[in-house]
Image (tube, helix red, strand yellow):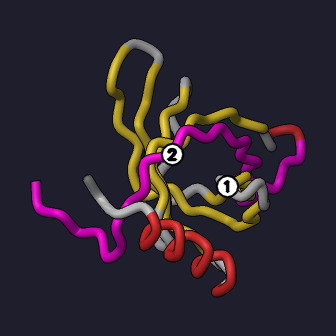
Amino acid sequence: MEEKRRDRRLDLEVSIELERLDQNDITTLKMIRVNVTDLSSAGMGFHTAQPLENGALYDTRITIWTKETIQSVIRIVRCEEIGENMYHCGATFVGLTSSDALKINIYSMLNPEE
């Protein structure tokens, strides 16, 4: 498969919750728990127990290694079944602040690939 990422992805063990934003009915907004598998200043990959719709928008707060919280909206760009009741999703950041992107890039420089 051809690599299309602009930024190096970081492997992290982080769990976050996502809240769906792009639905009008408040009863359909759901908090979803996911396990982040990789993170870059462009987006992130994660595992979840339920499939997510491509193009869906979610509000998220990610607690990073410095114990700081990064808040951003993400857009789901892919979601593939990887096992029974397990999905791997990819998302891009929509509106990640430059200071939060810098925090991710600094961590990437301090933790080079092995």
Q: Residue at x 18, y 64 (%)?
A: 3
Category of crowding for the residue at label 1, using alpha-carbon neighbours closer than 10 angstroms: few (below 14), some (14–19), many (at least 20): some
Location of residue 69 in the rendering, given as x and y in whole percent from the top left corner: 78, 60
Q: Which mark is residue 74?
A: none
Looking at this rendering, what residue extends furthest in the top direction?
A: 84
Residue drawn 34% across and 67% down?
Answer: 8
Name the quadrant containing residue 72.
bottom right
Name which quarter of the figure residue 14 lies in: top right
Residue 24: image location, x then y, percent: 81, 56
| 38 sits to left or right of 74 | left
Question: Where does label 2 land, which residue?
Answer: 12
Q: Whole-percent x and y of residue 78?
A: 39, 50
Question: Which residue in the structure is indicated by mark 1?
Answer: 64
Q: Is 66 in front, or is 62? A: 66
Q: Is residue 5 above or below residue 32?
A: below
Is 49 placed left or right of 2 in the picture? right
Nearer-the-camera pick, 114 or 4 = 114
- What is the secondary structure assignment of the residue under circle 2? strand
Q: Is residue 15 magenta?
A: yes
In the rendered image, which quarter is residue 29 located in? top right
**111 displayed left or right of 99:** left
Q: Amino acid at mark 1?
A: Ile
Tell which circle, 2 or 1, labels the residue nearer the N-terminal end. Answer: 2
- Residue depicted at 69% across the width and 42% down the height: 16
Label 2: few (<14), some (14–19) or many (≥20) C-alpha neighbours in 10 Å: few
Report the Cα–Cα distance between label 2 and label 1.
Answer: 9 Å
Pointer 2 and pointer 1: residues touching (CB < 8 Å)? yes
Image: magenta residue range? 1-26
Q: Is residue 56 above or below residue 96?
A: above
Q: Is residue 80 magenta?
A: no
Q: Residue at x 44, y 50 (%)?
A: 38
Q: From the viewer's perspective, is residue 68 above or below residue 79?
A: below
